[in-house]
Image (spheres, rainbow, N blue to C red):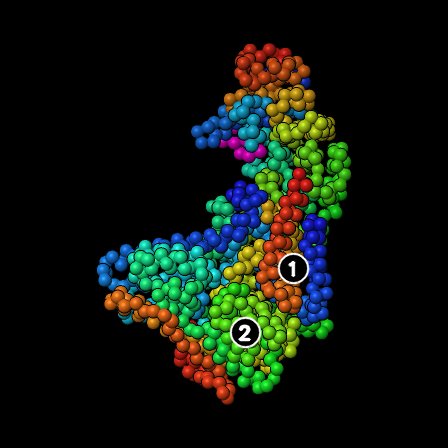
Amino acid sequence: MAPQSAWFRAPTVSVMATTTSLSATAMARILFITVITLFLSLGSFSAQKQPVIGLITKTETNPFFVKMREGAQAAANSKGAKLLTGAGKADGDNAGQVTAIENMIAAGANAILITPNDSKAIVPAIRKARNKGVLVIALDSPTNPTDAVDALFATDNYKAGVLIGQYAKAALGGRTPKVVTLDLFPGHPVGAQRHNGFMIGLGLEAPGAGSNTLGTAPAIACAADSYGDQAKGQTAMENCLQKVPDVNLVYAINEPAAAGAFNALKRADKEKNVIIVSVDGGCQGVADVGAGRIAATSQQYPLKMAAMGVEAAVEYVRTGKKPSGYTDTGVTLIAAKPMAGVKSADVKTGMELCWGKR
Amino acid sequence: MRIAVLGPFLALIAACLFFATQSDRFLTGENLSLVLQQAVVVGIIAIGQTLVILTAGIDLSCGMVMALGGIIMSKFAVDFGLTAPIAMAAGISVAALFGLTNGLLVTTVKLPPFIVTLGTMNIAFAITQLYSHSQTVTDLPLWMTALGDTFSLAGTKVAWGTLLMLALYGLTWFVLSETAAGRHVYAVGNNPEAARLVGIPTRKVLLGVYALAGVFYGFASLLSVGRTGVGDPNAGQTENLDAITAVVLGGTSLFGGRGVVIGSLIGTLVVGVFRNGLTLMGVSSIYQVLVTGILVILAVTADQLSRKGAR
Amino acid sequence: MNVPTVHPVPDVPAVPVVLQAKNLVKRYGHVTALDGMDFELRADEVLAVIGDNGAGKSTLIKALAIVPDAGEIRLDGRLVRFGSPIEARLAGVECCYQDLAVAPAMTVAENLFLGRELRRAGFLGRCLRMLDRQKMIDVAGARMADLQVGIHSMTQTVETLSGGQRQCVAVARAAAFARHVVILDEPTAALGVKEGNMVLELIRRVRDKGLPVVLISHNMPHVFEIADRIHVARLGRRAAVLNPKKLSMSDAVAVMTGATAPENIPAEWQA
């Protein structure tokens, strides 16, 4: 009988043990990544000149990063490069990404592409990699300082926010905005950039692109965190609806959160009078635009981002030419109903370019 | 026993009174109904978690098993065109199977529940991601989401899922406090050796508890799918700690053998009330995390003191 | 009735033997814990079992309640084999194990009925399997009053009781339901003087109610205070059965440790 209660015997251990559960998962994943990278590195000895490229995403499972990995894999295959992949255990996990960098250096990576979970904390590990002659390219999100990496291939999240803000302003057509924002979580640069860009587009005052702080304004009647998750987005929207029953505009950090917001509005029979705008441009999100659930979304291109990164890395290995600076991989506003004065592409175009198709 | 729930209950009432003074929208039937709806998923997982914790165990796999159940039922319905009840039953069965596996590993291989469920948590997560290709399952048949629908009761919208949750709490309370099987769960958690010596089949009790917990996680997947209208492979990532938090806030002892299942509902609601109330006040959700942390420490301290006092 | 064969002991009145074991053998791997142990419990007595560590005291209890490797056990003359503690209980042999016996967070009544709960009559009990709490409380109260255990509230949790009272609950649970034999394993081990006496008083009352008691104990003063006869276990066998009124504690210890060889035990010491 003892085993099933053994770890509970010491009173001080009990709570601690529950909180260590996730780090234990992380350990398991790190172990897994180590084994995989070691395995892959063994393979790399046989193909002497094959470029080895590491891709480290924020998480293993977010569809955005799943697609990014697929894009990188396709580009690596066509260029004859070997791709190693790793990820943080969750959005915000820096330690997992540091471990992945270390393992990839050990596995002989020539270049590392990374979407940093923590723009500052990752910098020392990146510096170590670069000192060993590894090319490091940031994808999707910049590091802080931005020149900690050789180059940045990213969507301009601030601009993505501006576009949907402008669209929302036109769609409101003179009505006073009563806004609910469903943000990511406190302190995340992408969350702040999209949010603040949206405010600027809407004609409100907001912090600039370099700020990590969410802008506030009287027009934003309720701001809540969705963690980019549909269920949590729905909960956040329900609570905001209690505070702001007459909301007419919803900004959602991404399309799952937007879908959650639509669910909440529909339950309250308010979905017809509220404009929802979002960012990402995943296929499900574009389909939601087509179905009228989301009014407009700023489409980004993770496949392209990753493919460009892999190509630059291969070129570096073959010719020694390093990419540098910031390359915008582009953003397109997708809307079912175009608004005068706001440039947008239709749903059909969006569906052709979208990521995350099943 | 009743005293154990009193503290959490008072905390809930105090929180409600506080938010009522801060926002005139808080104490409306509609808003309270909403808090209940938001509590259903963690609330039902917390029932299973309470059973396991009463036996001095712990179940880390609950959230991931819930996500797997949700993916199974939604993919079975969409990909194979199974009718909703069969797809739902399939999802619940898979969740129950995971619970049974936990139970078998705990009772026969005699591994600590922490390790067993840490393992099955990762296995369930991996299967969920592999089977769904990390893609959300949409376009579910209408029946699948019926539990998320609401009906009007005295002018207030009530979700069917809320009713299901309350019914499951009632049923579990009855079994735990009014039947021999329920009392044996307490005895096994309280003093496993004594329970074995008086002839209680302790292994069977443990096996039943873990399997039943799996069934509850399956019901939670049903509610999660019903509420969001999709099968979400990334659901359930924080629900294990959320559920353990709810159980602890509800006054159930992590050392086993003490606690009341209704307490876990109160614990779930405390967290939900803070989330809702702080949003109404326009305060950042990070304060909800702060308050939850403080309450957990208080709850565990109270448990520790009462156990010490009893010695 | 099967007349039990007893080792010829002088001047012993013909008292019926309740529980008798012959030539019990129990091995754990290479260790032979019981090596042909005989045992005999008579009606209306407290039989103490003493012995050094490893002499086979605890194993004897386990062998009496659970199947031994060899040997036979007779209860009221009938050959019995108990597959589990619960079968022993069903046959009317109740065991109370060393300080492991109660669930502290449960009430006195619940502990008394643990594993043999009473269900309500009719639909509620048969179909909903609902417990009859009130009846359990009433019966528990009556049994406890019967044994004069000074615990009056059957709904208080055991952890709110003193150590002695807790042990009394454990002993009373065994005594309240035993029909033939009560076996107590070190019931006074963890208790102070006053609390130990409380438990001894209870054991005496159990015997006076007509239930024979087997008392396994290390505590010589307690054994000498309460035992009618003393079974000495040594090296997996019965070294002797002694009469506490005829010898001193040090005499008993000498037998127990082998300082006095079995063949040198004076006849008047034996019981």
Dot 2: element: loop
Q: Identify the residue under disc 1.
A: B270
Label 2 vs label 1: CA separation?
Answer: 35 Å
Q: Identify the residue under disc 2.
A: A206
Horizontal side of A322 relative to A159 (left or right) equals left
Instruction: Respond whether the residues carrying marks 2 and 1 are from the same subunit.
Output: no
Q: Disc 1 sits on a residue from what chain?
A: B
Name the residue type under label 1: Val
Dot 1: element: helix
Q: Is residue A297 visible?
A: no
Name the residue type under label 2: Ala
Q: Nearer the viewer, residue C176 or C55?
A: C55
Q: Which residues are magenta?
A: C63-71
Residue A22 horizontal/vertical position (percent) = 49, 55
**C65 is within the stretch colored magenta:** yes
Q: Is residue B157 visible?
A: yes
Residue B217 horizontal/vertical position (percent) = 55, 60
